Amino acid sequence: MGLGNKSDVDDSEALEYLAHDKDTQVIAIYMEGIKDGRKFLEAAQKAAKDKPLLILKSGRTEAGIQASMSHTGSLAVKDETFNAVCKKIGAIRVKDFEELMDLTKAFALQPLAKGNRIGIASMTGAGCVMAADYSAEYGLEVAELSDETVKYIESYLPSWIKVKNPFDSEMLFESVGPEDCLKISIGGILGDKNVDCAVCVLPLTPMFTYDIETPINEIRKKHPDKPLTINVIGSKDVVDLWTKQLENAGVPVYPSIQRCVRALGALSKYPKISSALASDSNSAQS
Amino acid sequence: MGLGNKSDVDDSEALEYLAHDKDTQVIAIYMEGIKDGRKFLEAAQKAAKDKPLLILKSGRTEAGIQASMSHTGSLAVKDETFNAVCKKIGAIRVKDFEELMDLTKAFALQPLAKGNRIGIASMTGAGCVMAADYSAEYGLEVAELSDETVKYIESYLPSWIKVKNPFDSEMLFESVGPEDCLKISIGGILGDKNVDCAVCVLPLTPMFTYDIETPINEIRKKHPDKPLTINVIGSKDVVDLWTKQLENAGVPVYPSIQRCVRALGALSKYPKISSALASDSNSAQS
């Protein structure tokens, strides 16, 4: 909902409504300033207790604050103060609309991660390296695969290939074909007891068009409790088609590895935020 | 071109080739490590002297370096060292493929900015605030419009509206219609002597479909020496169509304000990098 210039309904009231709305799973808000700080804080804190609350607040710099004055006339809040507020109430602060939409999609489609250990399967070696880099940046740890998983995947590969995480799935693709490659790599990795979430990098060329929906649906049904994001790279037609199919199957697709890993980072960080909040309010009650 | 595992041709040789290739305007490279440091440095330095050189280097973190070992077996380079190398040779280091493609597109389609003063025209107030925030982040200064431009734009508006930068063009849109709104706002701002580059934020709904190519073509022909980027937001069909039309007209389109402003930041920073390099080599010669 757009609140216009907020002369009547303000952010706090919208938050209160969305926190109570049964059909709302995630709350994503764009705001510029705060008129009544205490009211906002209370509403946001209540909302964030029940649902992931993502906040995009502009007016972060002097130039932005000046522009905001003419737009909504909102009072400026020091950026560090607002960061501290978000941390206190358990809201996730994002930096742009892209991140707001990316994380909203992740929270809406995927379960939370129970830990921060990421599994990586990429059809290109570069994807492996980049996903590992981003994992470190977004607070995720590259999981050590269990012996079972390693043996399982290696059983489909020539003997000179050693499987590890990140897993470069090109040879597997060539050995077993596209559908089975997905099932064995992503399915195997997501099922590993040492893995809490996984990212899959899928570059495609027209040559590589195949049924993606069936294997991914199967994997999701087998591992509904672990989040998965997919980066599809390739010609626009196929990317559009696969994105639609994969998101129908409940797996968020992003156009970059960075955005895939960032989403998993948020799904892994949020449970910690929310359990910290719960223990805060328990100790306050006792 | 893909260099595979670089057992024969390496980055340095590819750089040398691209630096000499007349059809190459911008060089964008993805790399993991460096085998022969001196050779790379020399090739990169030469290449960056003539053309914008954008480098995406992964293996930035310990996790990424580990993954890179299995991929290309490249030797790791300390990330700070590589940053220093890029600075020295005048290369622009980017963080992901999205930024690599974004900036390549900007350098390929647009002129360099002669300074860092940005003009902002947005059909939404939020766009104004966010673009101002990003400008500060990417080293751009929100330009102060000259009296001539202010008067020119105000002459099309009700008298109670004061024009300034960032310019919220909603009322102008309502006063003069979509095509003239673009010509007057973006055209006026881009023509201002205090403005070195401009960003335009265009949200659309099916209601707002109109001919965008003609006015933008006209604006570009009138101001070929100042870079412009456009953020189109809306339903996928129209975004796809407009992106195609605008990029045919030579204006890069990005799906977020942040990416629009980041591209302008690079176009504004690069002339400084390259003139610093020129004066370096002049003083070395004298």
Image (cartoon, coloured by chain):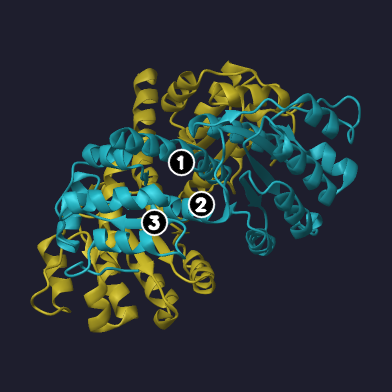
Chain colours: A yellow, B cyan
Please provide percent x and percent y for residue A168: 23, 67
At x 16% / y 59%, what residue is drawn?
A145
Q: CA distance from mark 1 to mark 2?
A: 10 Å
Residue closest to the far front:
B286
- Above or below, comparing residue A41 to residue A17 in the picture: above
Compute the Cα span from label 1 to label 3: 14 Å
The first of marks 1 and 2 along the sequence is 2
Disc 1 element: helix
Q: Alpha carbon of mark 2 to alpha carbon of mark 3: how far?
A: 10 Å
Dot 2 alpha-carbon crowd within 10 angstroms: few under 14, some 14 to 19, many 20 or more = many
- Nearest the eye: B189 or A211: B189
Residue B22 makes an appearance in the image: yes
Quadrant of the image containing the C terminus of chain A:
top left
Tag 3 secondary structure: strand
From the viewer's perspective, is the residue at label 1 or at label 3 nearer?
Answer: 1
Q: Callout 1: few (<14), some (14-19), or many (20+) C-alpha neighbours within 10 Å?
A: many
Which residue is label 3 attached to? B28
Q: Tell me residue A280's x, y (percent).
A: 36, 24
* B165 left or right, relative to B8: right
Which amino acid lies under the numbered mark 3 shown in the image of this protein? Answer: Ala
> Of A271 and B68, which appears nearest the observer?
B68
Please state which amino acid type lies under the numbered disc 1: Tyr
Nearer to us in this view, A214 or A168: A168
Residue picked out by circle 1? B270
Mark with earlier residue (1, 3): 3
Chain letter for mark 2, please. Answer: B
> Based on the displayed image, in which of its 4 quarters is residue B205 positioned?
bottom right
Protein chain holding label 1: B
Say which mark, if any, is on residue B107. 2
